[in-house]
Amino acid sequence: MKTRLTLSVALIVLIIVIMGFGVTFALFTDSAQSSTSALAAGTLVIDSVTPQGAVFSTDIHYSNLAPGDTGSGTLTVINNGSLDALVSISGFVYDTDTNPASLFGGATPLALSETNGIIPISAGGTADFTINYSFPSDAGNSYQGNFGTATINVHAIQAPNSGTVNSQGWTLGTGYGAGGGFTSGPTGGTSAYFVTGSQPYGWAEIRNPNFTGTQLSSLSALSYMTYVSGSAVSQVAPWMILNIDINDDGEWDDLLYFEPQDQGQSVLLNQWQTWDALNGSWWSVDGVAGMTSVNPKAISEYLNVYPNAKIVNSSAGGGVRVAAGFQSVPWNFVGYADNITVGGSFFDFE
């Protein structure tokens, strides 16, 4: 009797363990075998690039996936144009509106991602972009036998001039796959440009270190021009940032932001606009004088609190900056800046 009781307890424990695993793993009723060619390859041809940039698209199809499948495939981009290009993945569009059984719909959809950044492709050249996919391990039977189609959007913009560019003391900083520099502007001449790419928080900025120690109250002019490409996702223009020292210790204590979209007029696409930053509305990272991102105010409000505030450089570079990006979602912004005036200094990059 004792032996039989021990065996019965062991069987009960085994059944509990098996039931526990049954809850933990969600596999299809009929086990699907993952396809090694879920994204075997794709090809996209770019036939022309311009300073304004353009978006090109191709479709990739996914099927025969099992829960927990992950992998990657290659999208080969061919530049058939006559100009060198800067190319990036600008986003994915899924077939959930036209395909009720899409692998990209439901509670545990197939997910795509990429971290390629901006890749230069010379005229007549090619480049490979890696597209990653991941199908959640807890996907249920509702996905069995389903397929999905993703449209991959690729942004291409004319690459910078290969010759010497006069940056007039401005330097470039970038992060998270973004790019920028100085190139032929969208309407001629040389301009600073910003391409943020498809990664979250991608940013690009130009910085000038020659105004450190300048009293904010002494500025007689502060303005610049922007151009936002029509292929940009959002009508937000490059903004200006000032590193501010409020206690004369040579270190930055606050940042002042001038954002064109907060100036009471629309940011327009595919045309130059001039922004009078000195007489515009700014916000302070520290919220000085109530100057917040939702309540920007005139620089005079800041000077009422800190009359001796100065522009100061940081370890990253100059104290006067023009920037784009820093968004928590993929943005793929393309824009330009030119004709920057700081006090009595003028910069047109010519």
Image (cartoon, rainbow, N blue to C red):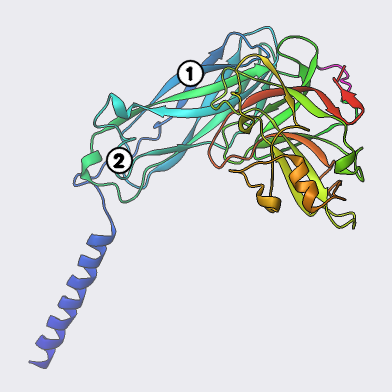
Distance between the alpha carbons at the discs numbered 1 and 2: 30 Å
Which quadrant of the rendered structure holds the N terminus? bottom left
Front residue of 65 and 313: 313
Residue 79 lies left or right of residue 337; in this view the side is: left
Q: Which numbered mark, 1 or 2, is in the foreground of this view?
A: 1
| Relative side of 310 to 1, left or right | right
- What crowding class fits label 2: few (fewer than 14 Cα within 10 Å), some (14-19), or many (20 or more)? few
In the image shown, does 323 or 121 lie closer to the viewer?
A: 323
Residue located beneath label 1 in the image: 57
Callout 2 amino acid? Gln
Which percent across, then down, holds residue 119?
66, 27
Residue found at the very far left of the displayed protein: 1
Per the image, the residue denoted by label 2 is 33
**Mark earlier in primary sequence (1, 2):** 2
Q: Is residue 145 above or below residue 161?
A: below
Say which element carries label 2. Answer: loop
Residue 349 at x, y percent in the picture: 85, 20
Left or right: 243 as drawn, with respect to 141? right
Q: Quadrant of residue 46?
A: top right
Could you say where residue 24 lies in the image, as x and y percent from the top left?
28, 60
Find out whether residue 16 is within the magenta segment.
Answer: no
Front in this rendered view, residue 284 or 78: 284
Give the image location of residue 220, x and y in percent.
88, 32
Q: Quadrant of the C terminus?
A: top right
**Start-end of magenta stretch:** 162-166
Which of the 4 image quarters holds residue 38?
A: top left
